[in-house]
Amino acid sequence: MVKLGFHVSIAGSFDLAVERAKALSCDTFQMFTRSPRVWAAKPISDGAAISFKRTLEASGIGPVVDHMPYLPNPAAEKPDIYEKSVATLTEELNRCHQLGIPYLVTHLGHHGKEDGHKKGQEKVIEAIGKALDNSEGNAMILLENTANEKNTVGGTFADVGVIADGLSREARVGFCFDTCHAAAAGYDIPGFGAETVFGWFADEAGSLDRLKVIHLNDMKGGIGSHLDRHEHLGLGTLGEAAIRDVLTLPALSHCAFIMETPVNEVRSDKENMEVARRLSK
Ligand SMILES: [Zn+2]
């Protein structure tokens, strides 16, 4: 049985995130450690960190995954945005250390017109390297693939591989694979099957042993649409068969499967969990 969970809210306290995950019968969950829509983060008090770790341990849930906030862009062309992005990555690794969180998922950003793609890649490698050097603890940074929208870094498996190879710190740098993003980027999971597509990922990005988190999302757009719009499991272009194919691929059995499915009237989180459980058997 694979580990299944959701991205849950920390509204109120970190402890409440654990309670929310428990109420949804999660084995694992993802969260932000702060508001994702602003640059500044309120420091975490020692009391809040201790309480979170205690509540988490008592729940038996894990691993917890931290997701980077939305504003940082480690490939940014503008020096001030770039510096703020490096500082936020560093700070977020410190927050993972404080909260005992093993994984920090990050997108690889968008390069500027002047910089171009290669310079963008170099900037991302430098940004993550600096954050790893200047932070405490040993949380692993997980590089997430994108839908390969215009000017993104990390839109192809090979691109993710360039960043991973450039960092060459295998114990601190791993991968997060988003099924919606991959198919939107053109990797046809329903057409070729999970074994083939993840085989490409292993060849071009890096070993599946370093793949720790799957963002298990169906998609609203078509294959190769570059549209980053998530859909409830089985109700989108991927469909139940492809989702099952991913959930039951033996090479992924060690991964934490995190749903980032929509919050709307079409279906509840609880129902998505039921579908995921059924498809993972
Ligand atoms: Zn993400």
Image (tube, rainbow, N blue to C red):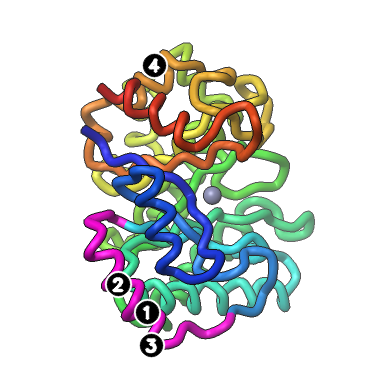
Q: Quadrant location of residue 228?
A: top right
Residues under numbered marks 4 and 2 in contact, where contact means CB atoms less than 8 Å apart: no
How far is mark 1 from mark 4, CA to CA?
A: 42 Å
Q: Residue at x 56, y 55 (%)?
A: 108
Task: From the top left corner, tell me how far across and down residue 265 is, in percent.
Answer: 65, 31
Residue type for callout 3: Asp
| Residue named by callout 1 | 49
Q: Is residue 211 visible?
A: no
How far is mark 4 from mark 3, CA to CA?
A: 46 Å
| Residue named by callout 3 | 46
The span picked out in magenta is 42-63
Q: Is residue 232 left or right of residue 84?
A: left
Q: Quadrant location of residue 55?
A: bottom left
How far is mark 2 from mark 1, CA to CA?
A: 6 Å
Q: On the rendered image, what quadrant is the C terminus found in?
A: top left
Respond yes or no on whether mark 2 lies under 8 Å from ligand 1.
no
How far is mark 1 from mark 3, CA to CA?
A: 5 Å
* Main secondary structure type of the part rendered in magenta: helix
Q: Is residue 80 left or right of residue 270?
A: right
Judged from the image, the secondary structure of the residue bearing numbered disc 4 is: loop
Task: From the top left corner, tell me how far across and down residue 267 is, in percent.
Answer: 57, 29
| Residue named by callout 2 | 53
Q: Residues within 10 Å of mark 3 (few under 14, many from 20)?
A: few
Residues under numbered marks 3 and 2 in contact, where contact means CB atoms less than 8 Å apart: no
Task: From the top left corner, tell me how far across and down residue 161 is, in percent.
Answer: 42, 46
Respond yes or no on whether mark 4 lies under 8 Å from ligand 1.
no
| Residue named by callout 4 | 193
Judged from the image, the secondary structure of the residue bearing numbered disc 2 is: helix
Q: Residues within 10 Å of mark 2 (few under 14, many from 20)?
A: some
Q: Is residue 167 magenta?
A: no
Residue type for callout 1: Ala
Residues under numbered marks 2 and 1 in contact, where contact means CB atoms less than 8 Å apart: yes
